Image: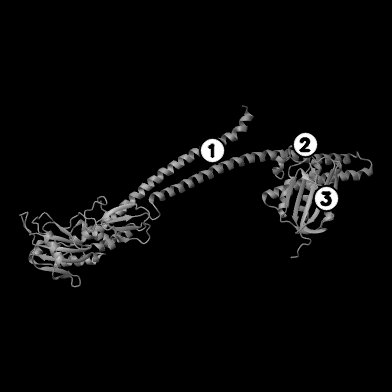
Amino acid sequence: MGIGGGKRYLPALVALLLLAGGAVLGVLQVYWVSVASRAEEARARLSLNRGVLAVCIDSEEEVRALLSFARVSSEDFAVRNWERFSDALAFWYAQTRFPGLLREIYIVRRIPAGGVLSYSREKQRFLPSALPSELAQALTGALSHQDSSRSWSTVTLEGWRRMVALPVYPREWRDPFALPVGAVVVDLDTLFFYKRVVPFYMERDLADFPYRVLAMVTGDVLAKSGELNVTQPPEAVAAVASLGAFGAGQPGGRGPGPDVFPGSPPFLDPLLETWLQRTQRDAAPAPQPPTPGSFPGAEARLMVYYPRGTLAGTMRAQQALNIGVSLGILGILMVGVVLLSRLYRRSVVLRAREQEFVASMGHELRTPISVIQATSENLRRGVVSDQARLPRYAEVINGQIRRLAGMVESILLYSGLESGKTREPAMTEIQLPALIREVVQSIEELAEQRASRISLFTSSMPSCLCSDRIALRLILENLVVNAIRHARPGEIRVALTRQPKDMLRIVVEDDGPGIPLREHARVFEPFVRGERSVRDQHPGSGLGLHLVCRVVALLGGKVTLESPYITIARVEQQGCRFTVVLPFQEHCSEE
């Protein structure tokens, strides 16, 4: 393959490489987006599981914190001093968000029979009371075993009540089967726990996720969020217990010190410190809990849903969107590369046309300059002695100057059109017959040289109209000159007619060889000359029809080409027909 052949196939090779590279980039982009989407789904699922786990642990810690406050030392039990215990409960009521979690709290002495005290929230102290029968029966059964290794016992009562018995053993005891000297009995409302405590932490930690709290046995809905679509599967399920496997008391008990209430933590207990920080500042660090569902005694399931369908479906939609956006951007880049390639090729073609234009204009300008130079030189040397021939020489010089001025005006007009600095049309009243006579006189010499005759059909044209005189003359001159130069010697027909809705129709026909159909799309482009014109070396710059098209557009009209065309007699003619349709007014409006 020669050098010329290589240049010929180089754009196709570059385009092929670009398409292959774009395909490879598209595959890599789809793979990368898929991997990133799967990783994002895993991160979202892990974050959701951690949030659900934190909700379960934080909710249970509310109960464990309450049980941590419900501890009485054996010394206070021996002397029957309940002041510090009362202060601890008052402090809990002042700090907690969920006072409804505690139904009642009792101090039971001399188990299994003895005095009973219950806490009065209004008076903030313990008062003599009677232990409800169901609590007494459950307490007797729970503490009937003489096993001091048990730090606390729980019994589920009717409904959603749960009793927690915290035994108090003597301070000095060595018998592993010694009986406790008393107990603190906490009556919990676990239904309140599932209806209020768990939803609170859900709204705090997972506010955007719909949820349901279902009873383990019956499946009843204990709590749920406002907007919930239960047709979709839950994204996370955790067993949540009102009281888990973490103990609250210690054998023998350990009470608060004498100077801690009110206003400060009752004692250095890590659980209580965490609870107080979360209660007062709502910023407790999440502990490292066991896996959801491992809580013993769980009475409900926490089911958390994704807010917009399923997590997998949302991630697939996001993945599809990311892939679409990525491929769209890649496609835009590829289109940009193709457009740049086409613009480059177009610039190369335009540069070649401009070079051809310069060469053609140089030849066109050289002819009138040579004629003017030769004629003026003859006059200067006195070669012309016959005075009668002087007007003829002057006419030749004047004609060539007009030709030269027309070329210059065309170049200047094209330069102004391309730079966007054209003037607005100067609308004036034009006597159309007079304008046509001027145009015919200006091109009469060229028509005689080409053995062409101009036939005018102006019977139905308006005699006066409001338009731009210079623009209208340029349209007529360029169309007629183009027909004279490129058609065979013969008749050039020019028709001006008035159309409905105040439209002026200008038609220029010739009987020449015509323009091939493949060249029609480029006829009105700048510097474009037909293959026949270049081959036969017809003079011209390739700007005439382009200027006609641009000026017609400025006047709000339209120009079309037909080659071959159908005559009025319904006969197909091989030549060209250019038709210009312009809007006009008979009189210019006065401002």
Residue 439: mark: 3
**Disc ID at residue 287:** none
Q: State which quadrant residue 297 falls in.
A: bottom left
Dots 2, 1 in contact, CB < 8 A: no
Quick one: quadrant of the C terminus? bottom right
Disc 2 element: loop
Disc on the earlier residue, 3 or 1: 1
Q: Which residue is mark 1?
A: 19
Residue type, numbered disc 1: Leu
Q: Residue furthest top?
A: 1
Quarter that holds the N terminus: top right
The residue under label 3 is which amino acid type? Answer: Val
551 left or right of 1? right
- Crowd around label 3: few <14 · some 14–19 · many ≥20 (10 Å): some
Estimate the x, y position of residue 427 in percent, counting from the top left. 75, 58
Q: Which residue is disc 2 drawn over? A: 537
Q: Is residue 42 left or right of residue 568?
A: left
- Residue at image coords 31%, 54%: 51
Q: CA distance from mark 3 to mark 1?
A: 55 Å
Which dot, 2 or 1, sits closer to the camera? 1
